[in-house]
Image (cartoon, rainbow, N blue to C red):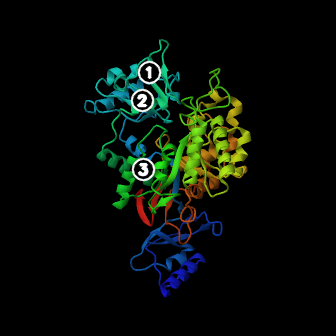
Amino acid sequence: MVRIKGALLASALAATGFVAHAQTASLILTGGKVWTENPAQPEAQAIAIAGDKVLLVGGDAAVKALVGPGTQVIDLKGRRVTPGFNDAHVHFIDGGDGLASVQLGDANSQAEFRARVAAFAKTLPKGAWLRNGNWDHQRWSPAELPTHRLIDDVTPDNPALLWRLDGHMVLVNALAMKLAGIDRSTKDPPGGEIVRDAKGEPTGVLKDAATDLVERVMPALTPKEMDAALTAAMAEAAKNGVTSVQNLANSSTDKREPQDFREFEKFDRAGKLTVRIYTAGRLQDWKDLAGTGISGPFGDAMLRLGDVKGFADGALGSTTAWMNQPFVGHPGYSGIASSELVDPDRMYANMKGADQAGLQLAVHAIGDKANHEILDLYERLQREDGPADRRLRIEHAQHLDPADIPRFARLHVIASMQPYHAIDDGRWAETILGPERIKTSYAWRSLLDAGAVLAFGSDWAVAPLEPLMGVYAATTRRTLDGKTPGGWVPEQRISVAEAVHAYTVGSAYAEFQEKVKGSLEPGKLADLVVLSDDIFKIPPEQIAKTRVDLTIVGGKIVYDRR
């Protein structure tokens, strides 16, 4: 009892800015500018850490008083500290594996695309698959989709499945189609499309659920490849100040989540995780998780699970986002509902079952029609099952009907969004959406003004795992082509403080962790980053040049730019 009372007293003293003299810090950072995300103490000079928790946040003198024989002291020299960034939407293993694969994201023509594929194929043994890629045909002039003929003769011995960067469309070569049994007689699966030429022959481009036709015959990553992918992913996270990630299912047809979780679990047990992971399975597999008795976020400080992800539609760049009105230049075509939402009653039954089992729901929705339909299902769920702290999420929430924006706050639905997509898609989005619909595309300002909670992420490997670029995007909305110096739809810009909040407290809230991380307060996890520049003082346009100097997870330095 005495020990318990003593611990409570020490905790109370720390919370009020005082610490028992007997306590010493394992690590302190002094002489800086600490952005705490704690409304009661927004800024400070220094921070003391004991083990994996914050011990004290305050002035230099108070923090230096906690120096002991074994304390590591870092002089910040005026640099800015923020809570560690929590990326609310990643595909972590895919991102790490993609770092070792052919890089097509910045290929600016079909010729460059072909040349890179040819060069990489020469490094592979016969029969090995070409994967990933993340190409973007919107960079090309004209912006035409590639076909298998572009790469067939440079990949004669290697089946290829190369993703478009949005993760909703692939290019496969003739060998991959042969292995999958795809020919002119193959029918489009529900929620997917096999793109065909004027003669009805498959071009090699597969959209959404149709990608599974080839994915099912592609071998899984080997244990060695999985280890390499996760190691690379953790290094990328540390380099970019990402101390937590929320790993979400890739698609409604992807069955790799159990394999990914086993990989995370292996590293966690070995004490090798350097980033905290909250991972989700597929909505349609909710019974597998519920059957174990798990309800809500479950796990330890480094690895947790408890949410499931569904899909409402595809993506804008693949023109598979489900819209209320047709795309410009595509009369009669307004995208497609996902293979899950084509049967809304079945999807709702899965949502209801998962919710009643105590699992968190997150649903991918890009188009305004898709978002509307999911908001309707969420509203029905709350009406039928009653109030609860569900933390319902819509992933992306990119293009919204203005009438639906207030519903996010009213229904307590978290808008889990990725700012980088706006400055990428903004280069061409108006050409297929028109000038009116873009006014509520990536509508961060409108959502915040309506009282919604924003949780920011990257969608890596679809976009870079770089929160600082996300903050830059959210505050400037300057498109990547440099053609919108005043910002694309500038009225939807938000402040640097609001963007950082969405990357820290907002993301922590989205995974039920705001009481243990997301802000720098005594007793919370010591996850923080040191930045090369003060992003709250420099012009927002310069944030893109800011670098992470130091990343600390649980009181341990996991990245040092020096």
Q: CA distance from mark 1 to mark 3?
A: 40 Å
Left or right: residue 126 compared with residue 495: left
| Amino acid type shown at disc 1 | Thr
Q: Residue at x 59, y 37 (%)?
A: 479
Which of discs 2 and 3 lies nearer the camera? The answer is: 2
Mark closer to the chain start, 1 or 3: 1
Query: Tag 1's secondary structure?
Result: loop
Query: Tag 2's secondary structure?
Result: helix
Foreground pick, 141 / 30: 141
Give yes or no for contact between labels 2 and 3 (Cβ–Cβ under 8 Å).
Answer: no
Foreground pick, 475 / 168: 168
Mark closer to the chain start, 2 or 3: 2
Foreground pick, 438 / 181: 181
Q: Residue at x 58, y 36 (%)?
A: 341
What is the quadrant of residue 99 in the picture? top left
Q: Residue at x 45, y 23 (%)?
A: 146
Left or right: residue 117 compared with residue 465: left
| Amino acid type shown at disc 3 | Glu
Foreground pick, 88 / 390: 390
Where, quadrant-wise, is the C terminus in this rendering? bottom left
Relative to 221, does residue 74 appear above or below in the rendering?
A: below
Query: Tag 3's secondary structure?
Result: helix
Task: Report whether residue 236 is seen.
Answer: yes
Residue 186's disc is: 1
Which of discs 1 and 3 lies nearer the camera? The answer is: 1
Give yes or no for contact between labels 1 and 2 (Cβ–Cβ under 8 Å).
Answer: yes
Residue 213's disc is: 2
Residue corresponding to mark 3: 236
Residue 219 percent coordinates (x, y): 33, 36
Residue 477 percent coordinates (x, y): 62, 42
| Amino acid type shown at disc 2 | Leu
